């Protein structure tokens, strides 16, 4: 089997923002003056809505504020309350609560596209600025209601765990991460999940019914076995995760828009890995034929298939 891709060499900026690269330095590196100008204009709106200073999350996401989410199952993590990224194709606004409660404003916004929690804009002139201002303000208000505490100390703790590659000699189980065996076990804990080996004994393919929701394999890395998994995700989240975690890279031998490869080197906390796996499983389970999907919902319940909703 082909050799696994090398790790992403871009340095992951800690979630605390304490790094040599500042937001200003990052914006200077963006080779699109108009996009930078639009980004700065939206940043002012986000700063006004949150009362927070801009902070670089990962390598290209400018966030304002933060929140610590915890699911009923115990899985948890940290994200910005609202964010923006001047990407090559679009100016991307991360509207973290999604658009269900913002549909009325979205209809008046102007030319744009949306993902699950992303607003894609070609240029700011395409939008109705007062409506955008209301949308940003409303988004922050929704997040403040859902997550009234920022839990800065927890954010720092997660950031420290995310920087753990320096402790590579510590067993993954002691770092509360995953290895090949624990990932395989977690895959099989999902309803009606089973393992197929269509590519030979070195790569297993977890499936729900007849549909693949991941791959799991191992390769030699500096003389040691390193496991890696391919997971499906929303395109906007795929980019976000690649920015936040050095061990998350574009899908290896997969559609790079919809799949990520995660290197199980201990740098990604177990809770975040479980969340990624749950999300991949949920996306595929939702795409099953209706009769199969409904039968599984009745048997196992929607939460077991699609995951718990964030705690208020």
Image (cartoon, rainbow, N blue to C red):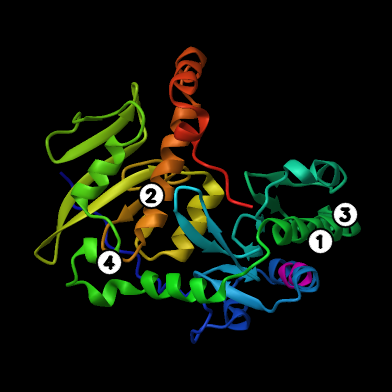
Q: What type of secondary structure mainly makes up the magenta span?
A: helix
Q: Nearer the viewer, mark 4 or mark 1?
A: 4
Badge 1 element: helix
Of the residues under marks 2 and 3, which one precedes in the sequence? 3
Determine if the magenta segment contains residue 40: yes
Q: Quadrant of residue 201?
A: top left
Query: Foreground: 237 or 50?
Result: 50
Query: Foreground: 287 or 193?
Result: 193
Outermost bottom residue: 20
Distance (Cα) linking label 4 and label 2: 14 Å
Badge 4 element: helix
Q: Nearer the viewer, mark 1 or mark 2?
A: 2
Q: Is residue 225 left or right of residue 275?
A: left
Which residue does the numbered mark 4 point to in the structure image?
A: 175
Distance (Cα) linking label 1 and label 2: 32 Å
Which residue does the numbered mark 3 point to in the structure image?
A: 131
- Residue 12, horizontal then vertical, whole percent: 43, 72
Of the residues under marks 4 and 2, which one precedes in the sequence? 4
Extent of the magenta region:
39-43
Distance (Cα) linking label 4 and label 1: 39 Å
The residue located at (73%, 71%) in the rendering is: 43
- Residue 81, horizontal then vertical, whole percent: 65, 63
The reply to whether the C-beta atoms of the residues labelled 2 and 3 are less than 8 Å apart is: no
Of the residues under marks 1 and 2, which one precedes in the sequence? 1
Q: Is residue 178 left or right of residue 95?
A: left
Q: Nearer the viewer, mark 1 or mark 3?
A: 1
Which residue does the numbered mark 2 point to in the structure image?
A: 274
Tell me if mark 3 has few (under 14), some (14-19) or many (20+) residues whose alpha carbon lies within 10 angstroms of its own: some
The residue located at (34%, 57%) in the rendering is: 270
């Amino acid at each position: 089997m082909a050799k696994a891709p090398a790790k992403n060499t871009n340095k992951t900026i800690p979630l605390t923002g304490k790094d040599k690269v500042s937001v200003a330095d990052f914006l200077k590196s963006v080779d699109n003056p108009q996009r930078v100008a639009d980004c700065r204009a939206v940043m002012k709106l986000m700063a006004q809505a949150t009362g927070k200073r801009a902070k670089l999350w990962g390598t290209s996401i400018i966030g304002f504020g933060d929140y610590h989410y915890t699911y009923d199952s115990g899985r948890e993590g940290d994200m910005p309350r609202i964010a923006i990224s001047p990407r090559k194709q679009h100016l991307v606004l991360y509207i973290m609560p999604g658009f269900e409660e913002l549909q009325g404003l979205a209809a008046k916004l102007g030319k744009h596209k949306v993902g699950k929690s992303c607003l894609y804009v070609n240029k700011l002139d395409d939008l109705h600025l007062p409506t955008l201002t209301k949308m940003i303000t409303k988004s922050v208000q929704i997040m403040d209601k859902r997550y009234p505490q920022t839990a800065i100390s927890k954010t720092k703790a997660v950031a420290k765990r995310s920087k753990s590659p320096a402790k590579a000699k510590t067993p993954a189980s002691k770092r509360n991460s995953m290895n090949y065996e624990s990932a395989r076990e977690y895959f099989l804990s999902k309803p009606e999940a089973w393992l197929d080996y269509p590519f030979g004994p070195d790569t297993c393919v977890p499936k729900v019914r007849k549909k693949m929701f991941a791959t799991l394999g191992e390769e030699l890395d500096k003389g040691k076995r390193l496991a890696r998994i391919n997971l499906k995700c929303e395109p906007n989240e795929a980019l976000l995760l690649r920015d936040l975690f050095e061990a998350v890279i574009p899908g290896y031998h997969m559609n790079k828009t919809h799949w990520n490869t995660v290197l199980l080197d201990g740098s990604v906390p177990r809770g975040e890995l479980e969340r990624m796996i749950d999300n991949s499983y949920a996306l595929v389970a939702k795409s099953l034929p209706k009769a199969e999907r409904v039968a599984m919902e009745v048997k196992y319940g929607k939460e077991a298939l699609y995951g718990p909703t964030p705690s208020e």
